[in-house]
Amino acid sequence: MSRDALLSEFVEKTATGFEVPGVAVGVWADGREVYACHGVTSVDNPLPVDRDTLYVLGSITKSFTATALMRLVAEGRVELDAPVRRYVPELVLPDERAAAEITVSQLLNHTSGLDWRMGVDTGEGDDALTEYVAKMAESESIAPPGARASYSQMGYNLAGRIIEKVTGLTYEQAITSLLFEPLGLSHTLFAANDVMTRRFAVGHKPGADGAPAVVRKWKGTRANNPGGGGASSVADQLRWARFHLGDGRAPDGTRVLPAEALHRMREQTVELPGGALGDAFGICWFLRDVEGVRTVGHGGSADGQFAELLIVPERDFAVVVLSNAGPDSGLAVNQAVVRWALEHYLGVVDKDSEPLPYDAVWAGEVAGTYANEIMTLTVAVAGDEGGAGAGLTIACAIKPEVRAAADGELPPDLPPAELGRLPGDADEYIVTGGGLNGQRGFFGRDDRGAVTGIDLAGRLFGRVSMPAE
């Protein structure tokens, strides 16, 4: 059986095993495109998934925002090291010094100190980002600008407002003009009214009987478009990946971005210790070494949909996976397919690290409740605390007040899953089960050695409380 046929077989088997209704996979290897599509767009209105089926990209959209800003930088219309207020003078934060000091580049590599996201809906009008930025006056920073990396949806939505101010267009119009039109990304859109005229996938989560059920909220609010609101097909995403493997020209030879500006995006700007998604940030991209091979990529999630894009520049390779189930099955399928493609097309094997045996002293230090503006993480000792059955678990929950204020369904909370310490003295960990399986991160400490926070998926959660006595 050919390698391409094996890919299709693996995609079908894996999607079926995890009960994911529909998966679309694209691979660029050996100078050719390969597709493997399986399943349906929706269990309620099933249509076959194909290479042009639209999925919500989630945070892969950030790569559009960053690339568009790099084009504006190349044209001399934006400076990366300039303060954001040069372009958005109305920016107000509770910390005036931070508002004055945050730079464009700090938005793009997640070192702005802004929190993960805000649970606000500023409507679907052309002023959505304007109103979103105004709401930032109520959002406390999590760190001084430039002090540390912490993944921020808020920062990318602010970057989208920079694009609007500089171009005089809405964010969506600007991205279409700067990127989608010259690159021929005709199946990449933002507005639901545009998407509904095409074949598109809807999200799913387990219903009352455990079978996949349709999620009714299809995507987030318009103000979240720069950080996660794009919808695209696997064919368009493979074209996007190939652009980032190239020299900045469109397929017809049109120069979209200077090669040096494009390649600069995948150069390390800040370390990301202990992260499952990467060892460092470039400009937007997560950078990670797998068996000595540098990978460049980004993932994304919406309610009941997951997306993954990974390129290996030195091998001229790319893989894209789009799936329509959650909270854990779609992610598991995406990760499995990416690893299969790396191994079978490049001979690169990506394995999870093995945790150390349970350490009661360390467990006592890190157990507790952690939170950011949207979610709460609970790290707890489970089992027999004095015996071999003891272990640490981590549970993830959306804050009740966020759920209460939400317009539509939100992803379900994730029940406790095992968490183990990784070798070394950096307080790094790995999750070994449940919806966070394979996620790595680290606990942060202050100068006295007290644990102050936990990083998960590049996001900082500050410590709220110790375990109850």
Image: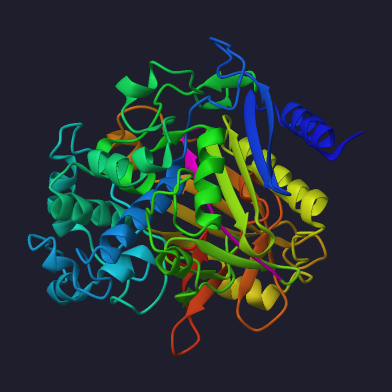
- Quarter where residue 401 is shown: top left
Vertical placement of residue 461 versus 19, above or below: below
Residue visible at 56% across and 34% down in the picture: 235
Relative to 48, residue 358 above or below? below
Q: Which residue, as the protein is rendered here, is positioned at the far right?
A: 1
Does 4 sit left or right of 422 as displayed?
A: right
Residue 468 seen in the figure: no
In this orientation, which residue lies closer to the viewer: 278 or 193? 193
- Spot occupied by residue 256 in the image (x, y as percentages of width and height): 37, 53
Q: From this viewpoint, is residue 192 visible?
A: yes
Image location of residue 385, percent across then percent down: 72, 65
Tell me where residue 4 appears, x and y as whole percent: 80, 36
Residue in the picture at 83% in, 65% down? 388
- Observer-nearest of 266 and 383: 266
Does 298 lie within the magenta span?
Answer: yes
Tally the marks: 0
Residue lying at the far top in this picture: please name it: 45
Residue sitting at x 73%, y 56% = 383
Magenta stretch in the rendered image: 293-304
| Residue 175 higher or lower than 100, as above or below | above
Predominant SS along the magenta part: strand
Name which residue lies at 69% across and 47% down.
Answer: 31
Residue projecting furthest to the left: 90
How far across and down, in percent of the image, does residue 8 sit?
77, 31
Horizontally, residue 94 falls left or right of residue 153, namely left
